[in-house]
């Protein structure tokens, strides 16, 4: 199934029900019309990071379901899968064979071996300081081989995630086979996780290395195009990098919208949000929440440093059960540029603020992605956070059927589902159409979406102080508060 211009649900396979079969039941029973696509977060066998350390892309984790379950979802919803193009589990057959057979392993070229990457007597401290890192130490891991020797390999993220050398033919073949396999099981869109780290080049910071990164993306795109599969490169960084990717005609994520919207709802001021909505491309997926934290760095320069600081501090004041410690090393936080909270709790568990935030997302350029906790206006899960000491688990609640049945009856959820159904059905949100954004006063925002022909019109009129808004199609009121 090709991508549809309809809202996409982001979910783990075991978070709306215990597995993919139960997820399909929830989708069919409660979410028909509101959801057109599903981003199934990693469902392959994995040894860490909630699926993001995959050991085998050819099979489904049996605890989550089967390929038949995946394909059943794909009959009714367009699907996005994750491909961790930068790394693979150290428990994968490739890395295990490398550990066992070392220089005689047919997979030895798949990995970035530090003694081969750097010239003699390097890396120096200067080399290590230059690398764009996700942790305080060098992104290297010492490997002990069966033959008794040791050496270091590149390891950007967690200890389970060993980086791949995407320049080598054996990895290119692995990429080709993985794309082909995903396409055969109904994948419409591949999310290229952590792709910006995939190119390592001497005397660079090893992050989004140009022009090499474009050559990699183009190779992957050409392969995916054989199966009519699209790509969504994933990157949390300054919004200008997203714009570069958009200029190369890829789908992008709007990761700046969450913080810009929070700033606007906290301050009551419309100027920053209006400016961003005018700048944003149509070929994108919008977010307010994902399986990670709320990104701060993505909105830098769209908000001033003072405005970013204000928004972060207000989040801790206004937010329900949001504490700075939950985004620290004490709770295994990997990214210091993200704040751990559900979006509903970031807005103080306030229905009016939350529904307005979603209305803004629906009217923003692009296709809305709604994280499963956000779809049910979920509060911060302190119990799961404390049980696991994992900061991001504050926003990774597990829902069973009984709880889902209760949550969907809440007025805020009913209104959100109504809003999404309207977004999916209205021709005014044609991605070839236009968007007009005005600010009648510093506290008001008016967004008008029109289809290409200009004869289908939807309007959002909002007051960011009172949180009152009206959604209209032509002269018919669809939703108001």
Image: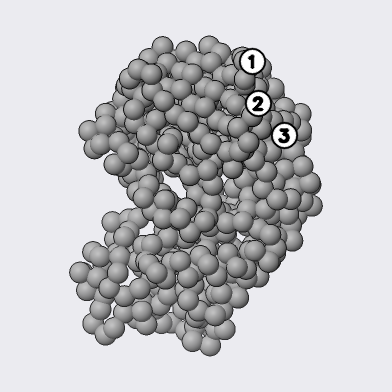
Which label sits on residue 422? 2
Label 1 and label 2: CA atoms lie apart by 12 Å
Which label sits on residue 201? none
Given residues 140 and 29, the one toward you in this image is 29
Which label sits on residue 27? 3
Which label sits on residue 476? 1
Mark 1: which secondary structure? strand
Q: In the displayed structure, does residue 280 sit left or right of residue 207?
A: right
Q: Position of residue 322 (x, y in %)?
A: 38, 28
Q: Tag 2 or tag 3, which sits nearer the N-term?
A: 3
Q: Residue at x 23, y 64 (%)?
A: 129
The image quarter in which residue 170 lies: bottom right
Label 3 and label 1: CA atoms lie apart by 28 Å
Q: Is residue 249 above or below residue 349?
A: below
Q: In the displayed structure, does residue 233 sit left or right of residue 41?
A: left
Nearer to us of marks 3 and 2 is 2
Given residues 375 and 474, the one toward you in this image is 474
- Asked if marks 1 and 2 touch (Cβ < 8 Å), the reply is no
């Amino acid at each position: 199934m090709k991508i549809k211009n309809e809202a996409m649900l982001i979910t783990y396979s075991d978070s709306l029900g215990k597995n993919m079969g139960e997820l399909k039941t929830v989708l069919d029973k409660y979410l028909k019309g509101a959801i057109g696509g599903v981003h199934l977060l990693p469902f392959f066998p994995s040894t860490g990071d909630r699926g993001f350390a995959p050991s085998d892309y050819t099979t489904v984790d049996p605890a989550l379901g089967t390929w038949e379950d995946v394909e059943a979802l794909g009959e009714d919803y367009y699907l996005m899968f994750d491909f961790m193009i930068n790394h693979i589990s150290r428990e994968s057959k490739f890395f295990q064979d490398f550990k066992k057979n070392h220089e005689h392993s047919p997979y030895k070229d798949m990995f970035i071996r530090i003694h081969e990457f750097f010239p003699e007597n390097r890396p120096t401290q200067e080399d290590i300081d230059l690398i764009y890192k996700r942790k305080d130490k060098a992104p290297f891991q010492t490997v002990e081989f069966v033959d008794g020797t040791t050496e270091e390999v590149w390891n950007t993220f967690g200890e389970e995630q060993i980086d791949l050398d995407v320049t080598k033919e054996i990895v290119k073949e692995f990429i080709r086979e993985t794309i082909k396999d995903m396409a055969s099981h109904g994948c419409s869109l591949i999310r290229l996780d952590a792709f910006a780290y995939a190119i390592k080049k001497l005397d660079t910071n090893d992050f989004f290395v140009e022009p090499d990164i474009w050559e990699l993306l183009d190779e992957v795109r050409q392969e995916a195009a054989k199966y009519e599969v699209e790509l969504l490169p994933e990157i949390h960084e300054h919004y200008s990098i997203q714009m570069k990717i958009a200029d190369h005609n890829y789908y992008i994520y709007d990761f700046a919208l969450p913080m810009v919207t929070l700033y606007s709802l906290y301050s009551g001021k419309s100027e920053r949000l209006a400016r961003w909505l005018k700048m944003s491309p149509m070929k994108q997926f919008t977010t307010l929440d994902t399986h990670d934290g709320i990104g701060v760095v993505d909105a830098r320069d769209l908000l001033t440093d003072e405005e970013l600081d204000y928004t972060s501090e207000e989040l801790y004041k206004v937010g329900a059960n949001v504490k700075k410690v939950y985004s620290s090393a004490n709770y295994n936080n990997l990214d210091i540029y993200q704040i751990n909270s559900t979006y509903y709790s970031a807005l103080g568990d306030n229905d009016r603020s939350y529904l307005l935030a979603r209305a803004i997302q629906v009217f923003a350029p692009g296709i809305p992605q709604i994280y499963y906790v956000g779809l049910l206006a979920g509060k911060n899960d302190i119990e799961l956070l404390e049980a696991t000491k994992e900061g991001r688990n504050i926003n990774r609640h597990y829902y069973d059927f009984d709880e889902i049945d209760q949550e969907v009856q809440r007025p805020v959820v009913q209104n959100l589902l109504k809003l999404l159904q309207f977004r999916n059905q209205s021709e005014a949100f044609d991605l070839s159409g236009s968007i007009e954004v005005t600010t009648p006063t510093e506290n008001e925002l008016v967004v008008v979406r029109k289809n290409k022909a200009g004869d289908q019109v939807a309007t959002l009129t909002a007051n960011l102080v009172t949180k009152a808004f009206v959604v209209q199609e032509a002269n018919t009121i669809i939703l108001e508060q």
